[in-house]
Image (cartoon, rainbow, N blue to C red):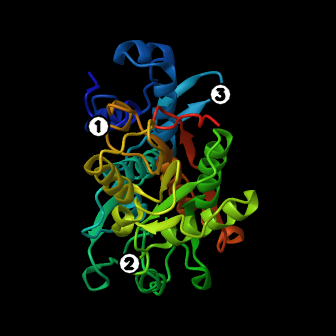
Amino acid sequence: MLDRNKRQPLYVQLKEKIKSDIISGRIRAGSKLPSTMQLAEKYSVCHKTVQLTMKALVREGLLARRSRHGTFVAGQIDVDKLARINKKHRFAMLVHFNADFSSSFFMREMVEGVMSVASENGCQVDLLVYSSFDTMVVDPSLSGFLLVMPSREAAEKVKKLGIPVVVIDAHHKWLGLQSVCSDNEHGIFTAVKYLLKQGHRQILYVHSDFSKAISFSGKERYSAFLKTAQRYGIETEGYTTLVSDLEERLNGPRFTALLTDGYDATIATLKILQKNNIAYPEDVSFIGFDEVDLAEQMSVPLTVVKQQLEEVGCTGMKLLLERDEGKKKKRILVKPKLMIRESTKILLR
């Protein structure tokens, strides 16, 4: 039976189970498989799970569909050939990791999106981590790379190999690489507009120090806040601050709402508010950019701009597989979603 406690999707488990049975001979070459409903009942899954499994196995050449007759195991299973095919469809997901990288949500959801598309298409993705440009090890025999948060130098190094590359959560315009990013401007716009509807016009934007590191997203979000504030005629002078300066800024001009620019800034801000006995939403409304561990289970559930990271991962992997030259230089944006919880309130005029 399938293990529902595993993080691996059920259709992936079922695919590997049937694949193993075919290669080992437990399911004979040329034999007809039970119907979708019969397999769903046998493995205690829904018919959609079985359909995804069958689709993936057909792509790998292990199964063949015959119109009005059903699904059959391929007549000849060449295990060596299958291994060669899988090798040709082997990719790598290269992740830049540094000491400030503290959110587990970011990588987990993105990897799940990448792996789901890879599994559906019968290919393998190796997850590799590097801490600096010098520690990046690239295997030129791979079919392609997904680069997560790369510096320009790192992206250029992989591009020089002459194989397909898709950049995730960064965009180096002049390298001409495809990229998939969260729509930072849309996320900030949505958060500010929501606070405005609640009556807040004195919004303090708390941001990380994006001058020191690879902070493509931080710069975009900061610019988006200034642009949105100008659009709606709200004050920005004195209403943006580094998170490291927030405690001192608490004594400055009054604000009724806080908007942070990412996971680390949100966590640091929560600690500063607690230290200074500032309660939300009683004293100040609070929205964070990026989901936070246990945000829904906090004593006051936290409103966040949640990046759709699984969709970002799915889209990146699909681009890598499509290799559509018409989209080669295209930057794809995935809109975040505002998760409204209890950390904001209507400001009584």
Which quadrant is the C terminus positioned in?
top right
Q: Secondary structure at mark 3?
A: loop
Count of numbered marks: 3
Question: Where residue 213 is drawn, which disc sits there?
Answer: 2
Image x and y of residue 66, in percent: 60, 30
**Residue situated in front as seen by the camera: 121 or 158:** 158
Q: Which residue is mark 3?
A: 67
Nearer the observer: mark 3 or 2; the answer is 2
Which sits earlier in the primary sequence, circle 2 or circle 1?
Answer: 1
Say which mark, if any, is on residue 20. Answer: 1
Residue 279 visible in image:
yes
- SS class, disc 1: helix
* Marks 3 and 1, how far apart at CA: 25 Å
Answer yes or no: do the residues labelled 3 and 1 have beta carbons within 8 Å? no
Q: Quadrant of residue 92?
A: bottom left
Amino acid residing under circle 3: Ser
**SS label for mark 2:** loop
Tell me residue 286's x, y (percent): 47, 45
Foreground disc of the pair 2, 1: 2
Residue 165 in sight from this viewpoint: no
Between circles 3 and 1, the one closer to the viewer is: 1
Q: CA distance from mark 2 to mark 1?
A: 46 Å
